[in-house]
Amino acid sequence: MITNTMTLDLSLGATPVFPQSLAPGFLATGGLDMRNFLRGMFLLNVGAFGAAATVDMKLQESDDPTFVVGTTDITGAAITQLLAAGGDNKLATIEIKVSQLTKRYVRARVAVGGAATIVGVTPVGCNSNNDPANQYDVAAVVQRKTLTTGKVNIYTPSGLLVRDL
């Protein structure tokens, strides 16, 4: 029987870059406080690329929650550049463990080059040190829905399993 829910295990714990048309330049998420989590993940969602546009995302860390001072790039924590030539509607993630950080906060910085492009970035805290993780959600999270009764279909390579919730 499944006893935990993803709602309890994951947190939308930092201000996202809400989906928008971003002119050439950059935006960053808020800082995910890694004092509360063992892992963090940043989900990049790219919609329509502008002509010949590029999109990059990297992670940065700081002990300052506003990232005004002491901000450093995290070595190896960057996606391979996404290109308009690769087509629209792309997703990419970067996951990091608290043990890979030297500072308290981590954020994603997304950069658009060439032409305006639709982008959004969602920070997710995982493996909370203090359950439930959703207690660390930012105010922008206005609703979560979890099916808690009935049966769930789980699809595996060997076939369909039906389990009680």
Image: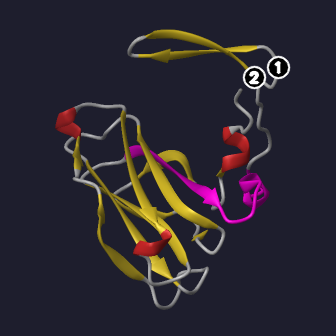
The quarter of the image holding the N terminus is top right
Q: Which residues are magenta?
A: 117-140
Q: Which residue is mark 1?
A: 149
* Residue 97's disc number: none
Choose top left, top right, bottom left or bottom right for residue 84: top left
- The residue lying toward the viewer, choosing from 34 and 12, is 34
Q: Residues within 10 Å of mark 1 (few under 14, many from 20)?
A: few
Identify which amino acid the numbered label 2 is placed on: Leu
Taking the magenta stretch, the answer to whether it contains residue 125 is yes
Where in the figure is residue 144, as x and y percent of width and height? Answer: 76, 37
Q: Residues within 10 Å of mark 2 (few under 14, many from 20)?
A: some
Where in the figure is residue 53, as x and y percent of width and height? Answer: 24, 47
* Residue 165's disc number: 2
The quarter of the image holding the C terminus is top right
Are discs 1 and 2 less than 8 Å apart at CB? yes
Outermost residue toward the bottom in this view: 69
Label 1: which secondary element: loop
Where in the figure is residue 27, as x and y percent of width and height? Answer: 46, 63
